Image (tube, grey):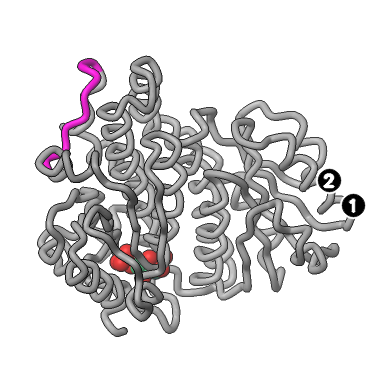
Amino acid sequence: EQIEKNGYDHFMLKEIYEQPSAIVDTYRGRMLVDQGLIRMAGVDDNLTKFLNAKRIIIVACGTSWHAGLVAEYIFEDFARIPVEVEYASEFRYRNPVINQDDIVIAISQSGETADTMAAIKLAKEKGAFVFGVCNVVGSSISRETHAGAYTHAGPEIGVASTKAFTTQITVLSLIALKLAKEKGSISNSDFHLYLRELDLIPSKIEEALKSNEHITGVASEYKDASNFLYLGRGFNFPVALEGALKLKEISYIHAEGYPAAEMKHGPIALIDEMMPVVVIATRKGHYEKVISNIQEIKSRNGKIIGIVTEGDQEVRELADYVIEVPETVEAFTPLLTTIPLQLLSYHIALMLGKNVDQPRNLAKSVTVE
Ligand code: AGP
């Protein structure tokens, strides 16, 4: 096991640090930046179906569901296809309306999640085309779907999903960009810009990982809090959900993720000097609005940890701590903002003496319904 951890103390930490290379493995051979091309067999072979789709329904659980939520923003923005994101466990027990021209995308790291599998079977019965985004090659879900794309993230051992999340977003971004190009819903120059930006993401994650030591300090300051709030807007709302899930599952601290603007509809009542609030406040994406959310927290004495774009000054003046990530286009910010949140939960769990790789009550793949 020590050998498999490759010098890291835990699989989770190793997997966090593997993200730059995992993402390269995800897009290698698929994204040809110089030629301005995206090639994905599972999509290419079914291109007409994708282009004629009236709607995409994404089904998944947990972190994979969060990746689906990020994809909703990306698909709608790039490819102008309406997207619904469903918890597989809810979808399968409803009587969902599915049409022949719907595409169902099932996302699963393990490819073994029972609820996601059941949702796929239901969608197939109703005549939908089902596309899988799995990590584990040859897994049950990858076999049950009509077509798919692997994330190629390599084995993920830590129960808390990290590199699976960012590589799922990468695969889904490639699909959205490909469809956007085919449909002409983004300009050629934007298409090229997005390819170049995606290509830069691995080195920007390397940059973001350099905050590890600083994040250790933030973790030691707040590790004894009983509650955390995570706030984000737009593409980063799902990242807030994911940050909260990471903290809950490995540190057992209660945490909630919210769209920042929803705070005033309830959660703001929770804020006092005991409440650390992690706010994703990158310069791209509703920046001014998020700043006013931060001011609302500050005036109620909440503690603010801002996830900001490199060089940011405005949030720095208001926040107790800021953690910087490099700049990128808004749609790809989740690939960067999620990194400090993974590290924060890792360090807090470690300081609290929790079993980071195998948290209580949890299994790596949930094969029961
Ligand atoms: C993530 O950290 C969790 N352990 C969990 O939510 C997980 O993402 C979920 O069970 C789905 O798993 P899958 O991607 O293997 O289907």
Point out residue 342 in the picture as x, y percentages from the top left corner: 49, 54
Magenta stretch encompasses residue 119? no
Q: Quadrant of residue 201?
A: top left
Vertical side of 110 occupied by 164: above or below: above
Viewer-side residue, 204 vs 367: 367
Badge 1: how crowded within 10 Å, few (<14), some, or many (20+)?
Answer: few
Q: Which amino acid does label 1 sit on?
A: Ser
Q: What residue type is labelled 2?
A: Gln
Identify the main secondary structure in magenta. Answer: loop
Left or right relative to 174: residue 274: right
Q: In which quarter of the image is residue 191?
A: top left
Badge 2: how crowded within 10 Å, few (<14), some, or many (20+)?
Answer: some
User: What's the mark number on residue 299?
Assistant: 1
Q: Which residue is drawn at 23% across and 16% down?
A: 34
Q: Residue at x 54, y 58 (%)?
A: 243
**Magenta segment, which residues?**
34-41
Dividing the image into four quarters, tell me where ligand 1 lies. Answer: bottom left
Point out residue 106 in the picture as x, y percentages from the top left corner: 27, 60
Q: Quadrant of residue 280?
A: top right
Task: Tell me if label 1 and label 2 are in contact, CB under 8 Å.
Answer: yes
